[in-house]
Amino acid sequence: MVQGAHPSSVSPFTSQPTQLPPAILAMVLEGQETPAAAVHGHRLSTVVPSSVTGEANYDLADADLAFKMHYLRGAYYYPAGDAVRGVTIKSLKDPMFPWLDAYFPVAGRIRRADAADGDAAAARRPYIKCNDCGVRIVEAKCDRALDDWLRDEFPDRLRQLCYDKVLGPELFFSPLLYVQVTSFKCGGMALGFSWAHLIGDVASATACFNMWAQILSGKKPAATILEPANKPLDSAPAAGAAPPRSVKPVGPIEDHWLVPAGRAMAWYSFHVTEPALQKLQSAAAGRHAAGTFELVSALLWQMVAKIRAASKEVTTVTVVRTDMSARSGKSLTNEQRVGYVVAGSSPAKTDVAELAAMLAKDQVVDETDAVAAFPGDVVVYGANLTFVDMEEVAPYELELKGQRPVHVEYGMDGVGEEGAVLVQPDAGGRGRVVTAVIPKDEVENLRAALGSTLLLQDA
């Protein structure tokens, strides 16, 4: 497990007293109105590769295009001190030039194939023109101290630290990556990344960001691997074939790559500490074999099912899992596994341990290949209630001057109205940081449900 600056029993989210017990679980609600100008003074610039790529094309795989409606948002927090002392925008930008030499597709722009470029089946297929247009750098300031920012329950925290842009409607000019550097009044700093999911999954994204930090620290990173070239799958589903159960067909979508959820969505983040996980594991011990991701996800599945019981049954869920041992080694790729689980009875009335057993790897119906092969545009996250396993991802390896961030949190844009839950290790590696992207009108009910569970009872 990743080790960090905070001991596992101490959360960087420690809150002011609220009506809920604060010691084990501290939560941040996002998605409502925010204090005006909490983050302000945005200044944009561009960084390009240090050498000319040469107008090369980077083809996108079918799996890449399956995730084109989604966007990863990640924020890395560094307190005032040695890690950020003397760090300037110039010192952060300088290693980006060789970094983008290695990751040159990230500095490109989306194009669509013309009929003249190939056969009719390939016409209009998106690809990346590696024209060195660069990534956008955003400088911003925050009038609050970092500790207050992490402690307070104000809305839209993560969104304010990650520049809020998607691809389109002018695809030719839309960057694939934004890096926002936010300076807090205390001297702390946050690095916020807005990453178009079609260029790679969360494992690709974090490895990419970590390479930049390695160059910044004067280390020689491992070479990137962008071969073999991506190619369309040889076979496609028969015309009129049913879509995979893990996704929801949309569109066709033209040049603005975002599908509105149909309901106002909120990001609700909370920290599950090691003692809370131990209680959850003890409650399930001896009945069903399940890991930490499965147990946390099962608890959220049960809670959401109870919240929605009057309107629908949440019997089918999607599971998106990163398995580092099964990856090809390519540096930019969407190799997460996608599948679904169907509960045989109402999840609202099913034991958490039993739900967790259903979410185990061997119980998930794998549709990874079918999702990639499906010819139309789809929503993956939020087509069903979706659980995202980030257990093997390494966000805390983004070190500045040898020091890891005190906290990292990831969210997702483009989530459908069924919602998504991202589960990742905390700074100590023993607890978990969970971000639930759900309809805004469900957040208070979820917050109340969490307040009545064992996760909140060891004050």
Image (spheres, grey):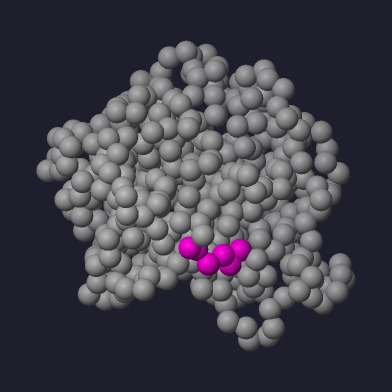
Left or right side of 223 for 416? left
Q: Outermost residue toward the bottom?
A: 240
- Judge by depth and name the residue closer to the eye, 233 or 365: 365
Q: Outermost residue toward the left?
A: 19
**Within the image, what quadrant is residue 375 found in?**
bottom right
Q: Is residue 244 magenta?
A: no
Q: Position of residue 256 (x, y in %)?
A: 58, 64
- The residue lying at 77 percent from left, 65 percent from top is 232
- The residue lying at 43 percent from left, 14 percent from top is 81
Q: Over which residues does the magenta segment extend?
A: 363-368
Left or right side of 439 for 90? right
- Judge by depth and name the residue closer to the eye, 2 or 402: 2
Instruction: Please tell me whether residue 254 is drawn above or below residue 129 in the rendered image.
Output: below
Q: Position of residue 251 (x, y in %)?
A: 56, 75
Q: Position of residue 401 (x, y in %)?
A: 55, 17
Q: Is residue 36 visible?
A: no
- Judge by depth and name the residue closer to the eye, 310 or 105: 310
Which quarter of the image is occupied by the C terminus?
A: top left
**Within the image, what quadrant is residue 157 found in?**
top left
- Judge by depth and name the residue closer to the eye, 138 or 323: 323
Instruction: Please tell me whether residue 290 is drawn above or below residue 384 in the rendered image.
Output: above
Q: Position of residue 355 (x, y in %)?
A: 35, 61
- The residue lying at 54 percent from left, 36 percent from top is 394
Left or right side of 128 for 246? left
- The residue lying at 60 percent from left, 75 percent from top is 252
Q: Is residue 451 visible?
A: yes
